[in-house]
Image: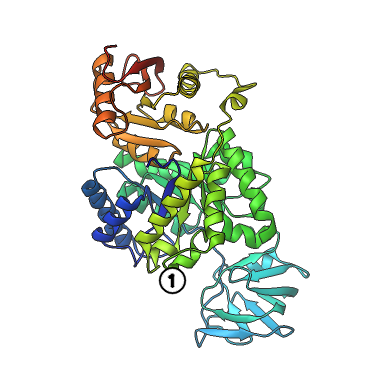
Amino acid sequence: MHRATKIVATIGPASNTPEILLQMIQAGLDVVRLNFSHGTADDHRQRAEFVREAARQAGREVAIMADLQGPKIRVGKFENGKVTLVAGEPFILDADCELGNGQRAGLDYKDLPRDLKSGDVLLLNDGLIVLNVARVIGNEIHTIVKIGGDLSNNKGINRQGGGLSAPALTAKDMEDIRTAMSLGVDYVAVSFPKNATDMEMARQLANIAGAPFGIKPKMIAKIERAEAIPALQGILDASDGIMVARGDLAVEVGNAAVPALQKRMIRMARESNKFVITATQMMESMIYAPVPTRAEVSDVANAVLDGTDAVMLSAESAAGKYPVQTIETMAAICIEAEKSEQSELDRDFLDRTFTRIDQSIAMGALFTAYHLGAKAIVALTESGSTALWMSRHWTHVPIFALTPRVGSERAMALYRNVTSLHLDTNTDRDTALQQALETVVSKGYASRGDMVVLTVGEPMGQAGGTNTLKIVRVGEPY
């Protein structure tokens, strides 16, 4: 069955072979995430090659996302690999400490002491350990353990409420952007941006690094800092899409605040004509179990009902025991949730104004297909913008975007309710439209007698040039 919501999956040791990747693509994988927090440049290069080969064998394009590590603030390493912190006991975070022990731990971010003051609360290891800052002396942060537990090497540190000054792009991120561009990635996800400026800087670096390869990747802002919430509209304007990164965000703002923030972020992204990915622990139990919990099923379904473009797997597909089965399960949940979605297209169009011809054509195609009960919308597009605009509104009418540009075809793999297909370049409109219909029919998406709404631009071959809407029945002359 047609599935509108896309699936992003992280590649790691459990899925790092062409054979498993092919099975994952056949199971419904749309976008592969390369996590630059782990692995070398050569590791990522090999994985990207495996993805492209598996996609070729599967007969469809799959997008690749490079996810930058960002300024994740962590404790250093310990003499014995880990220590146990006890509530009520003192513990020191020491920027000068090389190897930690039961009394103190080192820091990978040496400026952390300058960001803190007495009374601050630090959350370690995704909030499982809580430290109250008693005082800061030079490069030492003296704390009292509020909630203890085992603390092992390189666990993350957050300040409750946010406010740490670490820049969004580290030296490692800048080098990783260059690596990602050499791999021909389609998306770059920026970790911990605080404002629009962070995203603008990342885009500029990516465009410069991608220029020798003819690449301008789409930029994704991962919303995981408390400071990003009041700056969300500016971040959206400076990005192509956002990721609701619920892990670090929950640590900074509190778990209870995240569900409402998720709904708000998805709504704002769609209203801004941006795409959105919902991520973190969506099918966490399937790292070890062949079936998800009922709560995880509801979590994925609710993200779909919220209007997310994509749902994402992290450790489930990178290190889990059931990477293929997890994707199959997630795809089935998405399809079932989409059946119950109510279209509110008429309400969506109230008080809307369109200043661009191509956007007006896109909205006209949606409205026409919805009210005429068309089987499909077929958009001939160069950049994919027409398909993106259409995908911001839910109609139950599948959108098929045909483009001669492989880059556009891959990028549209992330857009909700859009199936991207390749169409050979053709400057004759009627011939191109006929080829588009034949492509959709040959793949089983429409059959003789079905009504189809077509959009195209004249003259063809120009990005942003969509200016024609046509309604046809398959098998009948134009």
Number of numbered discs visible in the structure rendering: 1
Q: Is residue 115 above or below residue 350?
A: below
Relative to 262, 449 lies left or right: left
Q: Where is residue 120? Give x, y as percent.
A: 74, 67
What quarter of the picture does the N terminus occupy? Answer: top left
Residue 146 location, quadrant: bottom right
What amino acid is labelled 1 in the image?
Answer: Tyr
Q: Pick the residue in front: 164 or 159.
A: 159
Name above or below for residue 148 compared with residue 276.
Answer: below
* 254, above or below 127, in the image: above
Residue at 37% from the left image edge and 25% from the top image edge: 379
Q: Could you say whether the residue bearing mark 1 is in a helix, strand or loop?
A: loop
For label 1, the residue is 288
* Residue plotted at (69% across, 58% down): 256
The crowd level at tag 1 (other Cα within 10 Å; few <14, some 14-19, many 20+) is: few
Quadrant of the image occupied by residue 163: bottom right
> Does residue 184 appear in the picture of this structure?
yes
